[in-house]
Amino acid sequence: MDNFLRKLASPVSHSETSYLPAMTSTTKWLTKSFAIPIISEFGGQGLSVINKIKHWAIYVFTALLFFFHNVTYAFWFYENIYLSNVTESLQVWQKVISFFFLSKHSMVLGIHLCLLFRRRELLQVMKTCAWIESKCLGEGASNYTKISILSHLDASKFSLFAVPIVLGTLGLFRPCMPPSIANTLILECRDGWGDQDAALWVRLMNGLVQGSVGLSVAAVIVTTIKRIFLYPAVMVELWIKTIERSGSEVDAADHTPPPPPTPVLFYAPPPPEKIFGAPPTKVWRRFYFC
């Protein structure tokens, strides 16, 4: 039953006995998104900080697109939600969705900058966690995976594809709906929300931009929650348990009773009388009386 629940909670993982395969595949897609300043080395042999010009160009373009989208959407929110009185006609759920995207994108923008300035520390955390799990597996660690952690890892992997697809589809079919920025730059949507009529090229461009922004948002959130918070905490717990298990085995070996001592035969020399004979008592008596 436990194996069935593990496979149900982690349907795409290569192994239900280790987190390493799921984290490896998730990290591969994170680096391909260019939302974090980490890249896979040639041949997939490891991770490194972005150092090539072409990789920096893609990363900077992705970051600037994300920044431009956030600034434009914040301006739209300020003009159509905060200042305008026309928003009285909007329903509550429309206002909630608008504020949700504003707060989420603003938070992700701050995290994006932190990952950029702390890229070497991020690389060290990612490498150390993978090394800890490999080391513990080499020491014989087993049965340490949890269904909840495996399900979270698979959910984060799916979100890297689901979020950009959903946001890109919304940008294609609903170009005036937040978090679209076409209603500010190109379209004149009623109340900043309605009148979804737009040309096909506007819809395609808006969908591509919104999908790219959704990929950046998903990658930054997955990196923060899974690679910085969740996975290191699980690996530290595994490392401590492995050390405790090794220490208990050493203590058990030290408390093993020692084998009985082997008997040692000592040679007792004969008394001096048997070697040198009895002392000359008559000579000593004469010397004493003289």
Image (cartoon, rainbow, N blue to C red):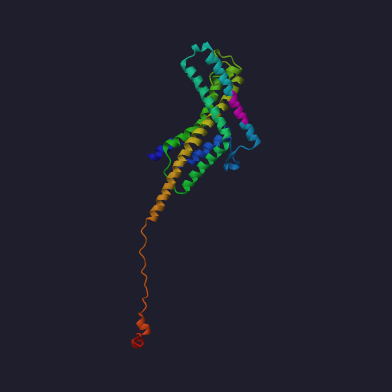
Boundaries of the magenta span: 60-68
Q: Position of residue 245 (x, y in %)?
A: 41, 48
Residue 62 sits inside the magenta stretch: yes
Q: How many marks?
A: 0
Residue 66 sits inside the magenta stretch: yes
In the depicted view, which residue is nearer to us: 78 or 186? 78
Residue 183's place in the image compared with 143, above or below, is above
Work out which residue is located at the far right of the displayed protein and give it: 53
Work out which residue is located at the far front of the displayed protein and give it: 290
The secondary structure that dominates the magenta segment is helix
Q: Position of residue 222 (x, y in %)?
A: 51, 32
User: Which quarter of the image is occupied by the C terminus?
Assistant: bottom left
- Residue pictured at 63% horizontal, 34% vertical: 56
Residue 284's place in the image compared with 180, above or below, is below
Residue 215 visible, this orientation: no
- Residue pictured at 58% horizontal, 21% vertical: 72
- Residue pictured at 46% horizontal, 41% vertical: 236
Left or right side of 281 for 135: right
In the depicted view, which residue is nearer to us: 143 or 10? 143
Which image quadrant for residue 62?
Answer: top right
Which image quadrant for residue 261?
Answer: bottom left
User: Which quarter of the image is occupied by the N terminus?
Assistant: top left
Residue 275 visible, this orientation: yes
Q: Position of residue 150 (x, y in %)?
A: 45, 37
Which image quadrant for residue 206?
Answer: top right
Residue 111's place in the image compared with 264, above or below, is above
In the depicted view, which residue is nearer to us: 195 or 47? 47
Left or right side of 280 for 95: right
Q: Position of residue 12 (x, y in %)?
A: 48, 37
